[in-house]
Image (cartoon, rainbow, N blue to C red):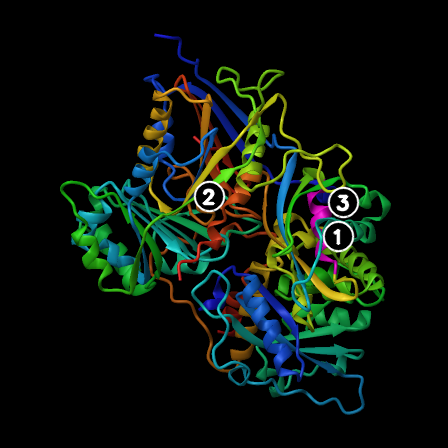
Amino acid sequence: MEDLAAFERLVCKNASDFHYMKICLVLEKGRRNVEAAQFKQLMISGLRQLYGEVGAALPFDVLKFDPSTLTGMVRVCNSSLVKLWSAITLIGSYQNELCAFRVTQVSPFLIALSGNSRKLELD
Amino acid sequence: MSPELERCSRNLLICEKSNFRDERARYDIHVSKHFFNYKLSMVIPECASLPACIAGVIQTFSSYYRVRDLPVYKFLQEDILQKVVKNGHFYALSYNTRIDEDNTIAFLPSGHLIMSVNKDTYEQLGLEGKPSQYTHRKVQRYVVNVDLTDKSMTPGAKTYQRLITSLKEWVPLKSDFLISMKMTAEDDGGALQTLLSQYSFEEYRPTLQTHTLKETPCPSLHSSNLHGDEKSCDAHRFLEWLGAVSMDISCNNEASSFLSTYVCPEPWSSMSQGLLCTVTGFLIPEDIHSLLLELRHYFDQPKFTSWLSITVHGFADSPVSWGMTEHGFLKGGENFYNFVCFENQDYWLHMATGSHDGCPP
Amino acid sequence: MVCKMAMFMDLNISFTKDKKTLQNIIETAAHLGYSTVAINYTLESQQKKPEIPKPASISDLFDKLPVVQGRSRPIKVLNRLTVVATDPSHFRPTSEYKLFDLVAVHPKTEKIFHAACMTFEADIICVTVTEKQPFHFKRAPVNGAIDRGVFFEIIYTPAIRDSTMRRYTIGNSLGLMETCKGKGVILSSGAEKPLELRGPYDIANLGILFGLSEGDAKAAVSTNCRSVVLGGETRTTAFGIIHTVKKPPSAPTPSDKDESGETDNPASKRAKMEQ
């Protein structure tokens, strides 16, 4: 019989460099065409307004954007999470239309965003 | 600027490597102790459709029930307690309750009743409990853990009577529940049906969804190397990639790309297609265990892939994660585990929890 | 019973005569996961003949209250009066105040701020967010308010509407935090439109920007609001029935001793005093 893999156990505390957010943009007059790049640009403008040029330079990724629901998956460095989140919370308008960003899920694990038991609707 | 703006709450990831054939391997215990599972997702590279034998196992998954406004003491009536709650395969979790806001109740297959309740309820209940570990400034939440298999909990005993009085008269605690039970040869669930039929309830089947993954980069894994190096990718990056393929996130981005710079971890090879299969519901460990057994047999026939993966997500609002470890919700309630099964029966097991949670076993 | 838990609350939804808008705001709040909201009526005392508004009946607003997202229960709607005071005589707790579940005071001068912290029978003291803080937050009154179970409220909608207001909101909040150390604060919206509301976890994160720790910020939209509501209940019943919690004789209450440093449950404290 071949050799079995030797047992090994690692404990990683805060080993992830990133946090992941599921973010939805809500517009006053309902859905309309917003492209992924505009979605990101709006977030960056929020960062610039609140944290200036250094804020606007904080790197983050829009991993995915669904234009039909205006929902994006975002990856951000741990140290920028609070800043990005607060910046988009304070965004109140998009192209002269009232809007709100709603963060529906946050996790240090991207895979955790693929399931949300709070959304298990049985009715 | 305040340092709080750059801080992040803690998270834990345990990575284990072993072999399914190793008698000392404890993977089955970790599966059986993660009681409340909301979703599982399998990724099988180079696979076009769900193999019939795996689909067959999913077919045998237990049904679950959603019952409305069930008083907690009803579970403790002699007949139900003996035939259902203490039968070793009974799972119940309060539904539509949030662990960071509401009273949350769970029955574990070990015969434990866990009640995570706010301070007022706790004081009115008059039962012995402990302050929640995730307390801020002052204690607002308590966890009451009752071992229903203990002698003192035999119907008729004084402590038992006290528990009934608490839950029936002092605080008539009731809730919607998700309930499931592994049926056995001796027990066809008759007693459970009798209980449910007194209330409004519905039966549900776990929902299966399959999705074919398009051609995508796929990290190269070597079972002997858990740490990650130039030949193999490390656990966090692998889990990130798994999340990316599960959610149809592109892994082909240029460093100069405006939207996303995410790329598949190195080294990688191209996967021509893959299968993503998810099962959602109130999934019990016994069923996940049998699925895992079947997945191990996937490599009985030669395959184009050397590994496959299964991820199991726990309920964000369960009062426990593994065993009786207290689980909470700060800004997320993640508690999940993931197996990477290799063709030589080696496996990696990743277990992860967020900030308001103990260390996985 | 509903409001006795550590659930998310927004204790400041601006009253508007436009019923549809008010309904929309409350529906949005329920959808965002708030279990309790308070409709706020403002009394501008400096006007010549200030008239205390009459709170609208909630049953006129909704036949059936919207259900809180992901829960099996309807949202709870309270009424609140905010007295804007430039003179101590403006705050006169009359029987008309008792028509409201909550009473707040917005002190415009240091003298009134001091009185609000130390003596006024109010549940909430509003922190100015639309102009530069006109006086210092001194330790004695701030701690006095915390000890009495009166909470400081920071509203966030002006910070969404206008970047100047945003600077005042952040600056004034940080000023308060220096003194109160994150204790005794609630965060509310002050929303006039549904889209001005933000979700409870979004606000818990925003609280960090206002100088709160992660835990204090979450408490500012949940457990602290609960204390405010309980305090309001006690105040409105102070001359009538007194709420007492029946405790079973042998109930273990290990919690009573470990609460140094934080405001005790103001409701039980006041109830005891009234007895």
Upstream in sequence: badge 2 or badge 3: 3
Residue type marked 2: His
Contact (CB < 8 A) between labels 3 and 1?
Answer: no
Residue type marked 3: Ser
Image quarter of residue B291: top left
> Residue C274 versus residue B138: which sits nearer the camera?
B138
> Residue B331 versus residue B44: which sits nearer the camera?
B44
Q: Of the residues tagged 3 and 1, which is closer to the observer?
A: 1
Work out which quarter of the rendered image holds the N terminus of chain C and state it: bottom left
- Residue B333, given in percent of the width and then of the height, sits at 51, 45
Q: Which dot marks residue B327?
A: 2
Judged left or right of residue A31, residue C243 is left
> Residue B152 versus residue B266: which sits nearer the camera?
B266
Q: Of the residues tagged 2 and 1, which is closer to the observer?
A: 1
- Residue B117, given in percent of the width and then of the height, sits at 42, 54
Residue type marked 1: Gln
Q: Mostly what secondary structure, the magenta segment?
A: helix
Vertical relation: C62 (above or below) C254: below
Contact (CB < 8 A) between labels 2 and 3?
Answer: no
Q: Of the residues tagged 2 and 3, which is closer to the observer?
A: 2
Residue B169 drawn in magenta? no
Q: Which dot marks residue A38?
A: 1
Magenta region: A80-91
Contact (CB < 8 A) between labels 2 and 1?
Answer: no
Judged left or right of residue B307, residue A109 is right
On the image, numbered disc 3 is attached to which residue?
B2
